[in-house]
Image: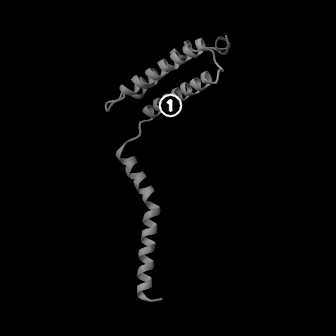
Amino acid sequence: MSIMGLVIGLVLLTVVVLFVAAPVLRASRLSQVSPSNPQRERVLAYYERVVGAIRDLDEDHALGKIDASAYQRERALWAERGVQALSLLDGMGEDAAPASDLDAQIEDMVAHARLNAVTPKEAAQ
């Protein structure tokens, strides 16, 4: 092999290694910039579930699986849960509350949602 072939091969190998390693390097840099907040992630996950439930409820109503009165009750309930989650997220600014306070707020929100939950029998009526 000639020297020119070795140099071109080395340059090509370097480019391929950098291309493959770029996502890993980018991910590690992002994780250093934004520290993980497990409470915020839990509330975000709950909010995503609420949005999914509203989407499913809208679809079921559009298909005629749920009557209008049950749809309105359940949609109002899920919308209230979404508002609670968003207000909790708003309260989690840079100076977030201690984990025990956030856990208590989440538990209160879940207890409130369970009290207002529509049972399957009520939804069928």
SS class of the residue under badge 1? helix
In the shown orientation, is residue 124 left or right of residue 69? right
Q: Is residue 107 above or below residue 29?
A: above
Q: Residue furthest bottom?
A: 2
Q: Nearer the viewer, residue 2 or 67?
A: 67
In the shown orientation, is residue 120 left or right of residue 36? right
Badge 1: residue crowd in 10 Å (few <14, some 14–19, many ≥20): some
Number of marks in the rendered image = 1
Three-letter amino acid code of the residue under disc 1: Glu
Q: Is residue 29 above or below residue 8?
A: above
Q: Quadrant of the C terminus?
A: top right
Give the image's coloring scheme. one colour
Residue at x 55%, y 27% (from the top left corner): 55
Residue at x 64%, y 24% (from the top left corner): 63
- How far across and down, in percent of the image, does residue 40 sit? 43, 32
Which residue is disc 1 drawn over? 48
- How far across and down, in percent of the image, does residue 117 sit? 58, 15
Residue at x 59%, y 11% (from the top left corner): 69
- How far across and down, in percent of the image, does residue 24 sit? 45, 56
In the shown orientation, is residue 66 left or right of residue 27? right
Q: Nearer the viewer, residue 100 or 13?
A: 13
- How far across and down, in percent of the image, does residue 2 sit? 44, 89
In the shown orientation, is residue 53 left or right of residue 64? left
Quarter residue 120 falls in = top right
Quarter residue 19 falls in = bottom left
